Image (spheres, grey):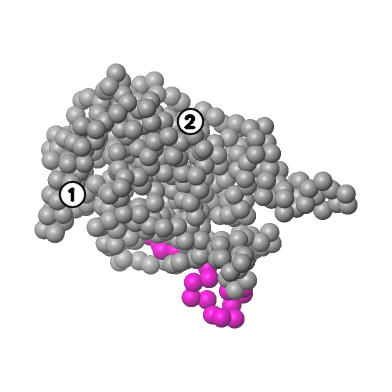
Amino acid sequence: MPSVALKLYSVFFKFLLKHRLQNLIQNAIDESSNPYGVTTRPEESVSASNPSFTDGVATKDIHIDPFTALSIRIFLPDSSLSPPEQPDLKPNLRSSGNDDPNSHNHRRSSYAPSNVGAPRNDPRRSSLEGLNLRSDNNVYRGYSPSPQNCRKLPIMLQFHGGGWVSGSNESVANDYFCRRIAKLCDVIVIAVGYRLAPENKYPAAFEDGLKVLNWLAKQSNLSECSKSMGSGARGVGSEFTKAEVQRHIVDTFGASVVEPWLAAHGDPSRCVLLGVSCGANIVDYVARKAVQAGKRLDPVKVVAQVLMYPFFIGNVPTQSEIKLANSYFYDKAMCLLAWKLFLPKEEFSLDHPAANPLISDRGPPLKFMPPTLTVVAEHDWMRDRAIAYSETLRKVNVDAPVLEYKDAVHEFATLDMLLKTPQAQACAEDIAIWVKKYISMRGHEFSY
């Protein structure tokens, strides 16, 4: 059973959440009056980005849409500094003493950047010591990749939770979680700051998720264009210098800036989607759109998705929705208020395509969906529908395992109070093991 401290914190959390939702309902405005939107609330504790490799991860924020508040935070692990010929793909095995792969407490592997703990004379240290830390006029600007010896890492798009109306990609809790995932999975994490409700109702958050995926595809193409033009720019009489080309590329939509971290270290052909709570609903939508887009998204390829305690609901209640309706942190009554703030009044239905993954005619056929890992908690009233969705995927031969955690609550691995618990760490490690099946360049090395 959850601890007394957790139960008390849950009561306090519910009180604050109810107060916040009621205030939003009272002050709700029509979404058309503020298309720019907001991506964080004033009461949210946020963590500033840091382009140096603090705790092994460098971060930067980018506002990618001039017409909305949509933004991203990039998490670049220092393993990207390892020479490309020495990828660190082998896990450091750490057993919990339980060899049952279906055990909730099973520890499969833990991963660390290749340079962590390396001796001073180890060649893996050379990339760290040779960092190009740009400093103009004594102003520190953080990590700036040099064109040589850049290791390519998979890219993970991460969508935070918060019941559509709160949360932030820059929050202290989300920053900690994304740093952990970036290091364990050895990926570049792009945390998406999508627009919140009620200022921007459905489909704003879903469109923002798809917009980031398209932005990633555009970045990849601009990067290749930059390399081509940069090579030509070295010739005699060239109109552009190489530096100018790297800073500014003009495409059919106007001027676009090449993001240097992604250009140097990102491998969009190994793209994973990860969503937390309502962010999992966004991930499932983006994955469907990626399947429909097909080669139009090249070179981006979504190879897997992770749904962490998704925010699914429906008109016909499941057993867990009945038995656990008053569960910890996010009870059913609170979530219904959140859905009313998110869905337009004329579209409100618990069987809305954004809410219920089991309704028919959502498209595309489920057999084309990417491999899907679902994480559920024992004391989460939304768990049964998430499990049912996973079972539906398995029926059409999609790799769709479920990781269920005993004595766990909704957001047990991402909530600020619970982030540093052994269970949260175990969940992140389990996700890393599964994800590495689909992002390893050597093929399916890791058994699951």
Q: Residues within 10 Å of mark 2 (few under 14, many from 20)?
A: some
Is 209 on the left or on the right of 330, as rendered?
right
Residue 287 seen in the figure? no
According to the picture, the residue beneath numbered tag 2 turns out to be 289
Residue 265 location (% of width, % of height): 59, 55
Helix, strand or loop at label 1? It is helix
At label 1, the amino acid type is Phe
Is 146 or 199 nearer to us in this picture? 199
Residue 368 location (% of width, % of height): 48, 31
Is 201 or 225 nearer to us in this picture? 201
Q: Residue at left 30%, top 66%?
A: 97
According to the picture, the residue beneath numbered tag 1 turns out to be 13
Helix, strand or loop at label 2? It is helix
Q: Residue at left 48%, top 30%?
A: 289
Q: Identify the residue at the far front of this view.
A: 137
In the picture, residue 305 is in which quadrant?
Answer: top left
At label 2, the amino acid type is Lys
Q: Identify the residue at the far top of this view.
A: 346
Is 297 on the left or on the right of 67, as rendered?
right
Residue 96 location (% of width, % of height): 31, 66
Q: Earlier in the sequence, mark 2 or mark 1?
A: 1
Q: Main secondary structure of the magenta part?
A: loop
Quarter occupied by the N terminus:
bottom left
Q: Is residue 441 above or below residue 206?
A: below
Count how many numbered circles sit on residues in the image: 2
Q: Residue at left 67%, top 50%?
A: 247
Q: Residues within 10 Å of mark 1 (few under 14, many from 20)?
A: some
Q: Which residues are magenta?
A: 108-126
In the picture, residue 32 is in which quadrant?
Answer: top left
Residue 185 location (% of width, % of height): 46, 56
Q: Identify the residue at the far right of this view.
A: 236
